[in-house]
Image: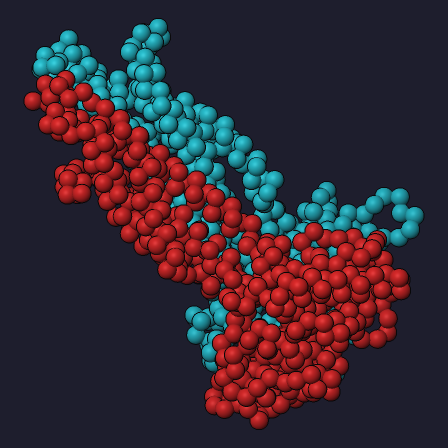
Chain colours: A cyan, B red
Amino acid sequence: MTSLFQMPMLRALSRHRILSALLFIQVALTCAVVTNVLFLVISRTHLLHQSSGIDEKHLAVIESERVMAPGTAMAPAIASDLEALRHVAGVTAVAVVDALPFGHNDWVNGFTSDVVQQGNTRLPIEVEPSLFNGSPGAFDVLGLHLVRGAPFAPEDFQPLEAAHDYAGLKKVRAAIVTEAFARRMFPASDTLGRTIYLDGRSPIRIVGVVDHLARPNLTVSDDNELSVLLPLIPDTAKVLYLLKTAAEPDDVVAPAKAALLGVSSQRIFHRAESFPSLRTEYFRRDSSVIAILAVTAAALVFVNLVGVMGLVSFWVGRRTRQTGIRRALGATRGTILAYFLLENFVVVGAGALVGAGCALAVNRTLMTWFEVPHLPWLYLPAGWLTMILIGQLAALVPATMGASVAPSVAIRG
Amino acid sequence: MEIAVSSLWRNRLLSSLVIAVMALGIGGSMTMLSVVHVLSGDPLPGRSKDLFTPYLNPLPLSYRNDRRMNPSDNLTWPDAWALLSSRRADLQAAMAGAHLLVTPGSSAQPFYAEGRFVTADFFEMFALPFFAGHSWGRAEDDAHARVVVLSQRLAMRLFNGPAIGHSIRLGGVAFDIVGVADHFDPQPKFYGDIASHPFGEQDDFFLPLTTAIDRKLEATSSFASWGSKGAGNEMESPGVTWLQFWIRLDSPQKASSYKAYLDHYWARQHTDGRFERAPDAKLYGLNEWLARKKVIPRDLTLQMALAFAFLLVCMANMTGLLFAKFSRKSGEVAVRRALGAKRADIVWQFSAEAVVIGLVGGAIGLALAQLGLWTIRRQPDEYAHLVTMDGWMLLATFVLGIVASALAALVPAVRASMVEPALQVKVAE
């Protein structure tokens, strides 16, 4: 170990104090930024793959708002729309719902594990899932995956009665919930057959549990699958029609719109697309943020690589004569190359070590400003190693050139 | 200069790396600078200095304020009406954003359009250009007339030809089209509900505010209310702020006397017991108002700062590269020095090289910045469609390129010029 310090390395470093400091600071900065960017890219990419829980590949979505005189009953109009959609070529099943994963329109309602009343000694658990109301075919059209219990029975279905202050909500008696919701509501026991209370009052029995169903709006938290399906048939002016298709869902969109306009032209299409395109649209911002972050990190790494290359070649160039003398005294090219690389390792390694510390600090700062998760510790050694590799890679070409100095150079000086 | 170009050419790898680093730094910082530059532009050049918005605060002392949305930024209808009828300014108008269903007929598909409820002076005050027809006057305001001015865009969509004289149903009410406005889309949308939508859509229709209140048409403003909700029309309530108000005053004297009038108005409301707060009226000029409301998203300012930090990093790296590049030529320098070149000449030679790097790097950086702006235009942000590069930013790209590369080259150039002539000649043989 003592031989390390006897090498002229540290003395050489201290002679070029400004340049060493420049390299050191730069490596630290790049390390801090790249580690965080890498982490953000990976965690956001994870979000992009959030499962919706539904059969996405064979689903087309049309969000239609009927324009009718105030007070007109919507239920018959929706029924005739569904009938028209059923006859569109390529459509195998249709349904009407009021919410969809990644669909933005989000109706969140509180449920409790027990009746909420004055004098309750134990506070019941409260969960606030997103509600998904749908017509009898909705469960199959969505292609949900039941893990326990049974789908809704025909007699479970009731109108939502939106025009009467959503009276259907107080009459509904059955619900299908996601596993995420079940775990949150009844952590210790089985869910099936248990009763939950809407707004702490109306009792609803859980008849089935599905594995996944994502909310209309995602957050970064682990609440993204708190969802409850209710057998309530939507009867608002604005509804979502779901079309299950045998082949490409994109192909049925135009004929389905035409069929609806055939029923009545007095409507607005807020959305008409296949589910895959809805999904892409929902994540557009995230995917472009990922792209921008990745490009930023790449640019920073490139600049860093080039900068290290420049510094090393300057450094090595200044010591042409010294290298010549060492070569004349019997040092091999390999020894000299190793020496230059070791020197680079010391500076870059120290810089990256400080950088890893800064990476943690940057992560903590970001956490207070934005919704950024905790940086897992594994990223720190990974970032450090990456920087070392980049440093060695950048030093390789100029150091090899510097090491290949002929011993005669020493004599010429 | 010739030496500079040929020297760059001789050392191609190193030069292209230096230029690439410069281009990346310039590209990043010019992208963000262009965005911020566009968004901080003057919405109504030439006119903005005469436009003012009054500030009154009718909120009760107990009202809990949200920091972002300040309900006292907007006026209640009774206050707006009082200011309108006082006619103390050269021109004055109250306004609010609108979102209405357009029903073109029983066979055509309905759709929603964004527009504005305004009072008559709006058009003259903001010098709204007319393509056809005309605006309406105060008489129509007072009569709650059902008249509308459409944007040319909406008129074309509906009629595909002359629209004047036709009528159109907006929010279930039939309006007579009296005018068609030429393109009018000031950005930031200073006269809108600026706290929530600083870069709103172009207005597709303008109709009398009085008629909208009368018919309870849907406004997009943020309604902030306090006190007990009366049975009457919420839009007319003295306890609901939702209106924007702008006036035109063409001299500072008029501005100060208007300010005095506002104080007087507030004092009277205070003694009457309607305003709980002591008089503290303000009159904000348009640009002052935009600065106060901080229309540029904080994220963008942060990103711009980061982009310039990146430019600094690039410059630091260029310095390193140029050290390497210039030091290789110490032999050449020594020869030139021995032949009588002064130190300043050497520095000058290296600076010329830096200028060439700055120009080429600036040109490539410009292309990168265009790519960056194209990416931003594809984002779902409200301001995305506004983002382009104007002549000033084009010029700034090259100036920034030259300045940045000259700064980066300064230390290496001076250092390289310090070689002793005789000593180096020997080495360089």
Q: Quadrant of the C terminus of chain A?
A: top left
Q: Quadrant of residue B255?
A: bottom right
Residue at (59, 88) in percent of width and height:
B177
In the picture provided, is B227 more to the left or to the right than B384? right
Residue B73 image position (x, y, % from top left): 70, 60
Q: Nearer the viewer, residue B338 or B173?
A: B338
- Residue under the point 83% across and 56% down: B277
In the rendered image, is residue A371 in sight? yes
- Considering every residue shown, the one lying at the far bottom of the view is B165
In the image, residue B284 above or below residue A411: below
Is A144 situated above or below B342?
below
- Residue B144 appears anywhere in the view: no
Q: Can you tell which quarter of the image residue A317 is in?
A: top left
Residue B392 % position (x, y): 39, 57
The residue at 46%/55% (across/down) is: B37
Residue farthest to the left? Answer: B429
In the image, residue A4 lies at what x, y percent?
33, 10
Q: Count every numbered label the image shows and give the total.
A: 0
Q: Is residue B248 above or below residue B211?
A: above
Q: Percent from the top left, x then y, of residue A284? A: 48, 58
Q: Which image quarter is the N terminus of chain A in? A: top left
Residue at 63% across, 62% down: B252
- Left or right, residue A395 beside residue B373: left
Residue B292 lies, with reference to residue B133, above or below; the image says above
A169 relative position to B156: left or right: right
